[in-house]
Image: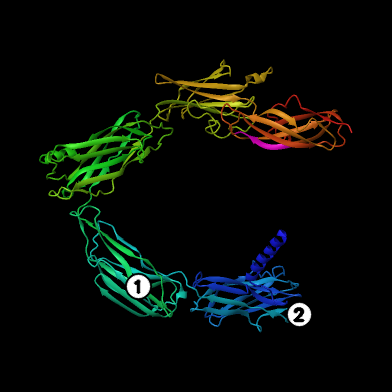
Amino acid sequence: MLKIRKMFAILLVAAIFMSVMPVMAAPPLPAIWPMPETLSFNTATTNIGDKFNVTIHIGTTGPSFTWQVKVLFNPAQIKVVRTAVTGATTSQFFAAGGTVIGVAAVVDNVTGFLSTGETLLSGSVGAIADSTLIWIEFQIVAAPPSGSLTSQISLDPTESFILDPELSEVAKSLGSATYTFIWSAPPPPTLSVSPNQNLFDDNTQHYIGTTFTDDIVLSINGAWNLNSLTTHLAYNSTLLSVTTVTFDAIWGTTNFVNNPGDLTLTVSNPTSTPGGNVVIAHVTFTILIQGAVPPLPAGSFDSSPLNLNNYALTNPDGPITPVNEVDGSVRVVAFLFLAQPQLVVSDAAMGPGAALGKLFNVTVTLKDLSEGWRLVGLQFRLKYPNALIEPVVAYEGPFFPYWASQEEGSLGTFWQSYFETNGGYGPHVLVGDMVYPNGSGMWNPPAASGTGVVAIITFKVISQPIATSIGEPPTTAPLEIIEQLAIGLENYDTQNIVAVPLAGPQNGTYTIYPMLPGRDIDVYGGAVNSGYGPIGNGTYLAFPAPYGGQGPNEPMDLVEEQSQVYFNANVTYNLYPVQNKLVGFQINYPDGSLYANLFASSDENGVATITFRMPWPSQNPESLFGVWHVYASVQLADVFINDTLAFHYDYKVRIWKVTTDKPSYIHGDQVNVVVEFGSHAQQYYPILIKVAIMDELSVVIGHFEIATQVGGTVFCQYKNATRSGNIFIPKWAYAGIATVHANIFDKEPIDGGAPWTPEFKPAPTIYILPQ
């Protein structure tokens, strides 16, 4: 019984749902009809200017060659803004019909129609129950009265047709769509002042007599059918006067009354339905007054509200309520009668000589201070490049002590400085200084004026780069004031403390020039490495930096067995080449014992070069593999200098392991072979992995090759990788023990390639089972 009740409940919900769904049935085929058939809009969510789409559908029972439609609509309610065929270049109906010629759409938004069509050059389109021809974008142009607007989007029966391949008109039925725009209370209108803020904040400008215009704007849905509006605008008549009022052209009847501080605007009889953002009036004001600093404190301003009030909006049915309100305001900053004083940070430069650990001073100067500010105190934060310099001590400059000595009864100055590590600003120096009043707490004239140093800050150089090339640019960083405050007296009678405005600071720059290195020797080199090395790339053959060991005590990239190697020692003083200096080279085995001492003189570029071929004895040559060291030394003006270079002597690549996916196979199986390998190479070299299987009677039964590359490691580390492939066991392979042979070449031997490492031993075995 419970299941039966649940089934009835489901059926009831389904019936209710189906009752509210619009019926979208097509007319009897053949037919042309618009979709959707019902287009219903409501003024609560839709406004004049909103858009919607209609698609023209077609259904046929036989072949078709041509179609044409003339869509009729009510231009007093809607208009066509765009249209196009429903396919990429043709209608969906003719999308597969071959070559199509379309007729450009003709739109008449005065009479109220759209006409277009398509025809095939040959062939036809067979029966299609439902396809599409064009889509049309309509725009709403009229709002309903307190009721609704209704019209039909239909097809002209005489100019909407389907032709068969013989160009005979096919009997058809035509559908139509119903457009309805229903009135219900739309969102409330908003009456606003635009712009709602008028800021005259440049304290160096005179604003008396300046005019500006604000618009009184109504944002309203056209469905309200507004026919009249009255509003009051309150303003500060001491600060502002109303100069002119002009009304928007939409209003047939207009009037305004201006009583000082209260402007009344009245409009009515619009020439079209007001909708969207509608301007009521343009109101131009004139600024009447502006304060001055001093005597007013810095930052003083006069202001006026622009408040809308006592407004009334009506339509044919009566008042429109509620109405949202956005008021405006005006602010006029006081004129800065005196020039603003400015803090100036000095520049500093260190180098190119050795500067690490040296001290230097940065001064902060107060510039162009007018006596009228009656300045008594100052504070600022100076940010510095903490990776390059650090503060040591901050001294009071002579400016404030001098003016304290001139003021009768002053107790001197109050000086403070702190080295802040963060505090939200990052590392900086915080400085404050003030002229003390007399013993009674009163300041007396004369007030400070002019230009003078307020702080001297001593910094230490903690970082200096070493030049690596002639003409290397210096490093620069800002010395910038990130916060500044100043105080003064409103007057000597009240002794009120007021802010003194400071101009933007003139920041300084710290410059550190690279230190010239003096005596220097740099040994670097390269290897031929089967022709993949530096042969032919310059006079001094070497791997490109950094792979050649360029720089002090830097390693060089891998050297393969029996390769020719080149080593260059660049001898310079302050980056300038030193010629005809005898340079000694010592080459040591991996165990530290001596392999050779060689000698060369530096040429006109300061470079001494040696070359030799790496040894490869007939007995146990791999014992020489490992890290070799090259030492280069020279005596330069009674001082011996040297540099060291290390490199790996090794095969370009080594095979660590060769494995198969299982130990035994039958004929027709695939053998999956995995090769694990690694390399000391830092630069990239091509490799060709070659794997073959020999059966028990030494017949090669299959092989594979994989082309890839090695490289990208760091010195003294192997970079390892794995690759795999499959070899098929043919029916003719001899059963028994088969061996897997793996090696790595640079390329095919026929192309001049050769093995880059010995074949992996012992060769792994698999068992081919007899069947």
The reply, left or right, for residue 541 in relation to residue 367 is right
Question: Could you say which disc has been placed on residue 673 in the image?
Answer: none
Residue at point 76% right, 75% down?
Answer: 61
User: Is 233 or 170 nearer to us in this picture?
Assistant: 233
Q: Is residue 491 visible?
A: yes
Instruction: Look at the image and tell me in which quarter the N terminus lies.
Output: bottom right
User: Is 373 or 455 nearer to us in this picture?
Assistant: 373
Identify residue for label 1: 311
> In this rendering, is residue 377 above or below 184?
above
**In the image, residue 606 lies in the stretch drawn in magenta:** no
**In the image, residue 709 lies in the stretch drawn in magenta:** yes
Q: Extreme bottom residue here?
A: 158
> In this rendering, is residue 771 above or below 230?
above
Residue 601, position as x, y percentages in the image: 49, 23
Residue 336, position as x, y percentages in the image: 22, 55
Identify residue for label 2: 166
Specify start and end residues of the magenta stretch as a single range.
Answer: 705-711
